[in-house]
Amino acid sequence: MRRSTLIGGSLVVVFFLAAWLIKGAGASGESPYYSAFLITLAAFLTLAVFSFLYADNPVYKFAEHLFVGVSAAYWMVLGFWQTLVPNLIPRISRALSEQLELEYIDELWNVLYVIPVVLGILLLLRLSRKLGWLSRYAVAFIVGTTAGLNFIAYTRSNFMAQISSTFLPLVGDWTSWAAFVDNLSLSATGPLALLMANIVVVLGVVCGLIYFFFSREHSGTFGMASRLGIWILMITFGASFGYTVMGRISLLVGRMTFLLRDWLGIIAS
Amino acid sequence: MKATFEKLMLLDRRWVFLALAVVGVASYSLKDFQVPILVTNESRQIFAAIDELEEGATIFLSIDYDPNSLAELHPMTYAIMEHAFRRGVRIVITSLSTNGPGMADEAIRAIADSVRIDREYNGVMYPGREVVNGVDYAFLGYKPYPAIVILAMGQDFRIPFPADYYGTPLEELPLMENVRNLSSTECVIVITGTNIADMWLAYGQARQGFPLAFGLTGVSTAQYYPYLNSGQLFGLLGGMLGAAEYEQLADNPGLALDGMRVQLFLHWTIIIFIVIGNVGFFVTRKRRGAGGNV
């Protein structure tokens, strides 16, 4: 390890230790030093992740590996205690149920619970080079059931509902030309705005689909519609990207607020 | 001029990060600067859905996000919960994401503390009161596999959640007496930043037809607007801006309205850098070869 790394690392440790002690001394409540430790640790990890913006470094690597490790362990523990233990143990073993203070469920169909146990064990066999192929049965079961379930559910919510919502009347509440002209206004909910909105939706859908139709050359009127389609797609991606930037900046604001308010106490809560 | 832009085109991106950090920290000091918020119809619909309910009505709130979306989604949860509790609307709460229970528990505690204080919102005085577990809210907790839990809650809350988060059987909670499933609540509001939103649409709203609204992270907001137009959603809060809109409607300024000020200055900084980058690109273009290299 280089001398400069050692000095830098030591300075970081001393700085955060001092920050913890100062924060703890100024805090109130039942266990001020414990809560101060948690806040200081969170601040250290936040700054450790931000340090990647300057350059990749060992502090960032530490925070990254800690996050991955803690997340994996948390998921495993939660999966075990929230899914396996309450659903499986009370159905396969009376003795284990008593040991874990769970109510034993004595049902005829309990034998069916052996199937997920076997499939779970097969999945874990991926770790073995010789028997890894057996895990494909469990994966095939998961893929098959998920595809089957989603096919019906998503056909209704994402396919039928979305198609029917594009079958729009180009003129809403049509009675006559005279009534349409009489009611014309620049209101966002008026008939003119509705007419424009519906035209944009119908044209956007048709032209967007034409852009993805490759069985005919994109020239002439067809080509114009295709070009309009790509514009519609670009505007959609732009809106999505704009929201993404806003979302990322919101996360930055959240972390900055944490550092300045909760950790340093510079801004009032 | 050209030389300046040539230098700018070679600017190390770390200067941009530093500029954002400086502008962000500095904008916290401009406490009096309020960002005007234009409330969208989709945000207003969610506010109205709760505001127009009678006292004692029940809504369902699913807090399906983890700490990584906390900055955007926690303000929404806070604003909706406080609004509902102040209006005397009861809430059934679940969390279908792994770290959701911690988020929900924190929000319940914070809002319960806030509701104890007398406050005036939109010119109406709301006296402080105690928010009681099992009466004003029922927190059912977390269960894995959201799609299956949503399907089960469509039949009966008691199938996936025989007891609440604190271990009390649902039969013993006064709030749950006449609330059997998702359709027996006035509306379902889901706050999430993951694909759990898709599951709520496919396995919840499409099958059971209850009124559904989303509070989403900025990243996922744009992709759910088609569901708003098709009537599958009655409202949509998009990112911190959506939360700020709700806070403004509820006359309850919080983290989101405060954060919008910082966000505005950071967005302007980004826009300025984008403009400089583009002008620099066109000014120095003549010196490039066909391949675009300087």
Image (cartoon, rainbow, N blue to C red):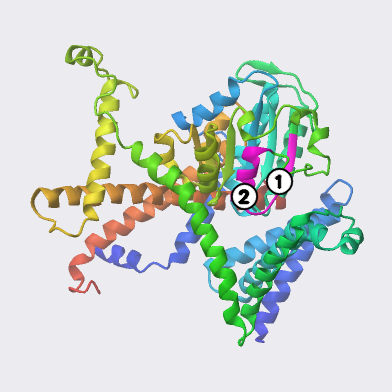
Q: Earlier in the sequence, mark 1 or mark 2?
A: 2
Give the residue drawn at x 70%, y 70%: A12
Answer yes or no: do the residues labelled 1 and 2 have beta carbons within 8 Å?
yes
> What percent of the width, then of the height, locates residue A197?
29, 32
List the single residue furthest toward the left. Answer: A220
Q: CA separation, marks 1 and 2? A: 9 Å
Residue nearest the observer in this picture, B86 or A229: A229
In the visual, does A103 lie left or right of B250? Answer: right
Asked whether residue A50 appears in the rendered view, the answer is yes
Whether B207 is drawn above or below B65: the answer is: above
Magenta segment, which residues?
A: B138-156
Front residue of this view, candidates B272 and B61: B61
Q: Is residue A39 magenta?
A: no
Q: How far across and how far down the image is residue A219, in percent?
A: 10, 55
Q: Secondary structure at mark 2?
A: helix
Q: How many marks?
A: 2
Identify the residue under disc 2.
B148
Q: Chain of mark 1?
A: B
Residue B19 vs B117, above or below: the answer is below
Q: Quadrant where the C terminus of chain A lies?
A: top right
Q: Judging from the image, what secondary structure is the residue with disc 1 in?
A: loop
Which residue sits at x=71%, y=49%? B142
| Pointer 1 local density, CA inside 10 Å: few below 14, some 14–19, many at least 20 | some
What residue is pinned by disc 1? Answer: B160
User: Residue B31, can we see it?
Assistant: no
